[in-house]
Every structure is written in C-alpha cells, then in structure tokens.
Amino acid sequence: MDVIKTQQISPRPIEKVIVHPLVLLSIVDNYNRVAKDTRKRVIGVLLGTSFKGTVDVTNSYAVPFEEDEKDPSIWFLDHNYHESMFSMFKRINAKEHVVGWYSTGPKLRENDLDIHRLFHNYVPNPVLVIIDVQPKELGIPTKAYYDVEEVKENATQKSQKVFVHVPSEIAAHEVEEIGVKHLLRDVKDTTISTLATEYKQMI
C-alpha cells in the first residue's frame, strides 16, 4: 500500500499524534484476550482531543471486527456496538471525541482505507494508529497515519486516497505515570512487559 511521507504534504492537517500509555495497555490487554496466538488483529476506536495539528489520544475501546483472510474486501465492524460504547464514554468525559481508530496490524492492510472512510463520519481528519503488540526491538510501538486525496499527474487517471505517515510519541500526565508504574510493577505477561520496558525508557 502506498504511503506518502509527511514532509511531502503542505500544509499538514495533522503534525503529531500523542498516545497515552493506558491506551497502549488497554489495546494489548484486548489483543491478549481476543487474538493472541492467532493471525487475527484487533481493531478499536481512539478517543481524545485535537488542537493545532496535534492529536492527543487519551482513551480507547475495542470494537468487534471480523475479516476474510483470503478476500480483504470482505469485513465487518460492529457499528452498533461502537455507537453504544461512544455514547457511554461521552457521558463519562464529554471532552473526549472520536479522533480515529487503531489496529494491531502489525502493518497497513488493503482494507484499511475502507475502514478509515467510516471514521470520516465522526471527525474531518481521523488518524489510524497501528500498535505493534509484539515488538521485536525496543522503540515506540506505534505508527500513525491520516489519509489524503492523491491527485494523479495524468488527467485520465482517477485521484485516490492514500495514507500519510505522521510522527507519533508516547506521553503521559504526571498522575498517569504514577498509576502506570504501579500497574506495571508486578506484570508478568511478556507482551505487556516488553511495552513496559519501552515505556520506562521513555519517561
């Protein structure tokens, strides 16, 4: 799948995506319960805020999702479940909005642009954050993207949507850091432990 580098787009609607550690832990927990030791990925909704080109991802929830391994055009995302979950989260924190969605990838897939299109119903510039739940090396386990219309030089060719890579980072408020440190102290799960090691090196 074609991906445009961030610097090729000007002006850029999104400059940076910040992912909070509790979002990562929630996604890993869901993956371990639903898709560990399978070829499946898990998908969910990202909540947070967006201001002056920075998307701040502070919360998330998983959404039931199925796809045909042989035919990527066949997939199902439980929209009713998403609507009811979002309604509940809105009552808890009205400041958090849908800012995009996540996938445990671990890389972009053919149907991701189709799924991404759904989230334009909730936000003008949704982000897709791919979380590598089984990282092979130390480093930030996130890759973030948004989509743009790529205009072809040849006028006879149709323009098409493509993903643009955007920098991402892991960051937390002070209260979050304290909570996460306590949470990770006795973690024995290797997947979460790897993420914990990476997170500790970042703070």
Image: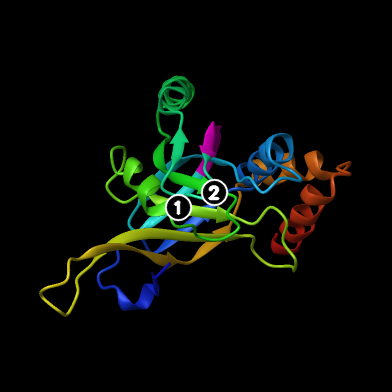
- Tell me if residue 13 can be seen: no
The answer to whether 41 appears left or right of 6 in the picture is right
- Tell me if residue 148 can be seen: yes
The answer to whether 180 appears left or right of 155 in the picture is right
Q: Mark 1 points at which residue?
A: 128
The answer to whether 198 appears left or right of 63 in the picture is right
Query: At which x and y percent is residue 184?
Result: 81, 44
Query: At which x and y percent is residue 6?
Result: 38, 72
Q: Which residue lies furthest to the left in this view?
A: 155
Residue 103 image label:
2
Residue 1 image label:
none
- Circles 1 and 2, Cβ within 8 Å, touching? The answer is yes
Q: At 77% across and 53% down in the image, what residue appears?
A: 196
For the residues marked 1 and 2, what is the alpha-carbon distance in whole angstroms? 7 Å
Label 2 CA crowd tier, 10 Å (few <14, some 14–19, many 20+) = many
Mark 2: amino acid:
Ser
> Which corner quadrant of the image does residue 120 belong to?
top left
* Region of the chain picked out in magenta, as a range: 58-66
Query: At which x and y percent is residue 43?
Result: 54, 41
Mark 1: amino acid:
Leu
Query: At which x and y percent is residue 61?
Result: 55, 33
From the image, give the main secondary structure of the stretch colored magenta. strand
Q: Is mark 1 on a helix, strand or loop?
A: strand
Of marks 1 and 2, which one's residue comes earlier in the chain? 2
